[in-house]
């Protein structure tokens, strides 16, 4: 059953923020606060503003900023309410890394 509260699932970590929309197709600029760019790989599940978002595509622009699209976001109007909202993701299973939450 999906979590419908506005708080992320227990244990999920803040990994960035949705910024302003990019174009008309529902893409958004993403500001990562992690160096783990695989967080934006297609198929990745993120949590934002009370719902899960699945990344369909992502890229870095010429200015170095990330742009991503999500299955659940169809157009610019749908992504605008997420502007400046935090993004969360499950912790990565990497035994070689030290995580702040540990």
Image: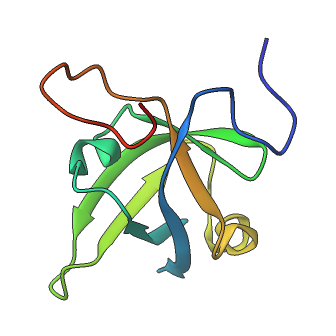
Q: In the rendered image, is residue 25 in sight?
A: no
48 horizontally vs 28: left or right? right
Q: Residue at x 71, y 64 (%)?
A: 78
Residue 51 in picture, x, y percent from top left: 73, 40
Vertical comparison of 33 with 56: above or below: below
Q: Nearer the viewer, residue 23 or 99?
A: 99
Q: Residue at x 56, y 34 (%)?
A: 12
Q: Residue at x 28, y 78 (%)?
A: 65
Residue 18 in picture, x, y percent from top left: 54, 67
Residue 1 in picture, x, y percent from top left: 79, 11
Residue 83, quarter of the rendered image: bottom right
Q: Residue at x 52, y 66 (%)?
A: 17
Residue 70 in picture, x, y percent from top left: 51, 49
Residue 31, quarter of the rendered image: bottom left
Q: Residue furthest bottom?
A: 63
Vertical comparison of 58 with 79: above or below: above
Vertical comparison of 62 with 73: above or below: below
Viewport quadrant of the C terminus? top left
94 horizontally vs 12: left or right? left
């Amino acid at each position: 059953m999906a979590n419908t509260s506005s708080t992320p699932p227990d244990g999920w970590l803040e990994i960035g923020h949705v910024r302003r929309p990019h174009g008309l197709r529902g893409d958004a600029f993403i500001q990562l606060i992690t160096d783990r760019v695989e967080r934006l790989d297609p198929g990745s599940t993120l949590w934002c503003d009370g719902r899960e978002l699945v990344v369909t595509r992502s890229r870095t622009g010429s200015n170095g900023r990330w742009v991503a699209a999500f299955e659940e976001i169809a157009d610019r109007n749908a992504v605008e309410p997420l502007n400046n909202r935090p993004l969360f993701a499950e912790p990565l299973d990497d035994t070689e890394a030290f995580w702040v939450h540990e």
